Image: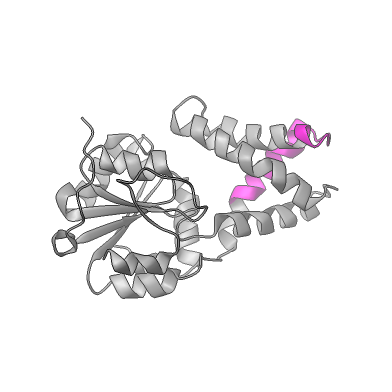
Amino acid sequence: MLFWNQPMESNQITDVFFDLDHTLWDFDRNSAMTFEKIFQIHSINVNLHEFLEVYEPINLEYWKLFREDRIDKASLRYGRLKNSFDKIAVSVSDEVINLLSEDYITYLPDNNYLLEGTFEILNYLRPKYHLHIITNGFHEVQHGKLKNSNIAPFFKTVTTSEMVGVKKPNPKIFYHALGLAGVEAKNSVMIGDNIEADVLGSMNMGLDAICFNVHGTKLDNHIKQVRNLLELKSYL
């Protein structure tokens, strides 16, 4: 059964759950810096802008397949690079692609740029609510991102898909996160950029939700949205 959102009663909300990538952590900027570094390490002579232009949509499609359990982690990590190099007609051996894949995961958390307003909104929310993370990202990588960007202390719990064995929008990951936090769905709200995984996934099992609609996607009127993190103050 689908539970459509009712107007948010902020006085009933005690716990706020955030997605991490593309919501608080500036994935695109940090990812670009990581590729620049690993291409230098492995002497990959490509135009970074040209590569990223094809990689970013391919990466999103691979994450959708991964979220739907149609590919595994190894296929995600290899396939998104292989397809991107093929699309820009650059020949890279499987051995080097695998090395790039490993180094990307290793170096990605070293970059720590956050989206505009992250610290301000977390400092605003922390005295009023318990804050948590629910992420489909890989366990070791996501904890590294939180630590290196200095936002780990804001969050009481961190739930990753690898901990639970399923990914958003599967209800099990939300139930696990709620149990870990010791809170009921009716007292919680989920904030994230992905309509399917974060917003509809949480709404379908009774959580309120706010879409961080940074790209200005046209949404149904019943979906709460903000275009800037600081706009969350109008809801919470």
Left or right for 146, reference 5:
right
Which corner quadrant of the image does residue 233 belong to? bottom left
Q: Residue at x 50, y 54 (%)?
A: 22
- The answer to whether any part of residue 173 appears in the image is yes
Return the residue nearer the eye: 164 or 85: 85
Position of residue 69 measured from the top left corner of the image (x, y, whole percent): 45, 27
Residue occupying image coordinates x 29% and y 50%: 209
Coloring basis for residues: one colour
Q: Position of residue 211 (x, y in %)?
A: 38, 51
Q: Please say if 1 is above or below 15.
A: above
As for residue 90 lying within the magenta part, the answer is: yes
Residue at the spot 55% in from the left edge and 65% down from the top edge: 112
The vertical placement of 204 against 109, above or below, is above
Residue closer to the observer: 81 or 143 = 81
Which residue sits at x=64%, y=49%? Answer: 104
Location of the N terminus by quadrant is top left
Question: Does 233 sit left or right of 23 as displayed?
Answer: left
Q: Residue 188, position in %: x, y?
A: 21, 54
The image shows a total of numbered marks equal to: 0
Q: Which residues are magenta?
A: 86-105
Q: Is residue 49 above or below residue 112?
A: above
Pick out the residue farthest to the top.
70
Visible in this render: residue 184?
no
Residue 236 figure quarter? bottom left
Residue 113 belongs to magenta span: no
Q: Position of residue 27 (x, y in %)?
A: 56, 55
Q: Main secondary structure of the magenta part?
A: helix
